Image (cartoon, rainbow, N blue to C red):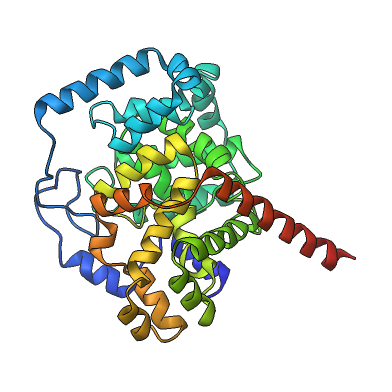
Amino acid sequence: MSLQKSVKSAGGERSEQDNASICSSVTTQPDRHGFFGGAQYSPEPKRTLSPSTILKREQKWLRMLNNWEAFMSKNYKKVRERCRKGIPASVRPKAWLYLCGGQLLLEKHPDEYEELLKAPGDPKCMEDIRKDLHRQFPYHEMFIREEGLGQQELFCVLKAYSVLNPKVGYFQAQAPVAAFLLMHMPAVQAFWCLVSISDKYLNGYYNPGLEVLQRDGDILHALLRRTAPAVHRHLGKHRVEPVLYATEWFLCALTRTLPWDSLLRVWDCFLCEGVKVLFKAALVILAGALGPAKVRKRACGLCETLEVLRHPPDAVLAEDYLMYHMQRLNLTEEDFEFEHQRQTAKRRAMANRSGS
């Protein structure tokens, strides 16, 4: 599969098999997240904490949000600890807005979103955005109606970003990220969160050439050698490059990969700790999907291995499994920084050799 095809699939293309499975599971009643069907549909009730525990966590989060600058500057470890436990649903939208810096951007530019919407926008970007609207969570109550309010707001958020950052314009993988944000907050807040995520958390991912994405794929592969050597050897043996399986994971920040409860928990950590959380989730998925020797034996080639990684076991993607194993990975900040510097230097040397 080429890099171009990998990127296109990250933006919203579905296989016939995926469409068939979605169509066979449509219901007349939405689940607790607002889905009427599709891969994200969760009909069973979630096992919850006791009401008293939820109330205590909500109160702790409200105190933090009311003293946000002090907590982030003097007690960041406490913020991180509470994000890893899971942000209460009632405060999650506000917490995400503060965690990613969207609130600061909104306060600094209170009227800019509306001004950006008044601009005509690049005609090609506007056309591409309209083509992709119906592909974003089409079985969610917010986006199920063609040209409904959800799709209209999604168009506005993506248009505003394309006007704000014409160098990027519109990148397909931004659409599911923006749609995911819109499910949790008003459009103006979703816009500034998208700006922060695109320009800070995933900085360079949406630039032409995708060099940053390819570098981070190499970092992921190097880290895998430490966390799951057998899986690392298997991928190397069959020449399964990270760009073939991890493109959608990174570009869409796992919004098109994880079950909804798992995705919410991962994003609680992602917006607090940054892109390394996506690396950790990817490492757990790789180890969980290809860790068993019998699975690697069956995945006896490139195509077979990719098929396993496109459909990881449900148990591996489950909230408790994913969060538990992400936090138990034996990786330090120094490990991430070392591989970042090593892969950056390696690419710089290659560029110098090709340019000489």
Q: Residue at x 77, y 57 (%)?
A: 348
Q: Which quadrant holds residue 314?
A: bottom left
- Residue 124: % across, % down: 58, 52
Residue 284 lies, in percent from the top left, at 38, 58
Q: Nearer the viewer, residue 190 or 235?
A: 235
Identify the residue at horizontal 84%, vertical 61% (top origin): 352
List x then y, in percent, for residue 186: 35, 29
The residue drawn where x is 68% and y is 56% is 342
Horizontal relation, residue 268 to residue 197: left or right: left
Quadrant in which residue 14 is drawn: bottom left
The residue lying toward the viewer, choosing from 110 and 47, is 47
Give coordinates of residue 216: x percent, y percent: 58, 56
Residue at the extreme front of the image, as rendered: 330
Looking at the image, which residue is at 42% across and 17% down? 68
Q: Is residue 314 left or right of residue 4?
A: left
Taking 222 as reference, is 64 above or below it?
A: above
Quarter of the image where the C terminus is located: bottom right
Position of residue 26 in the picture relative to residue 263 (left or right): left
Residue 145 visible in this rendered orientation of the protein: no
Q: Is residue 17 visible?
A: yes
Vertical comparison of 161 with 263: above or below: above
Q: How many marks?
A: 0
Looking at the image, which residue sits at the far right? 356
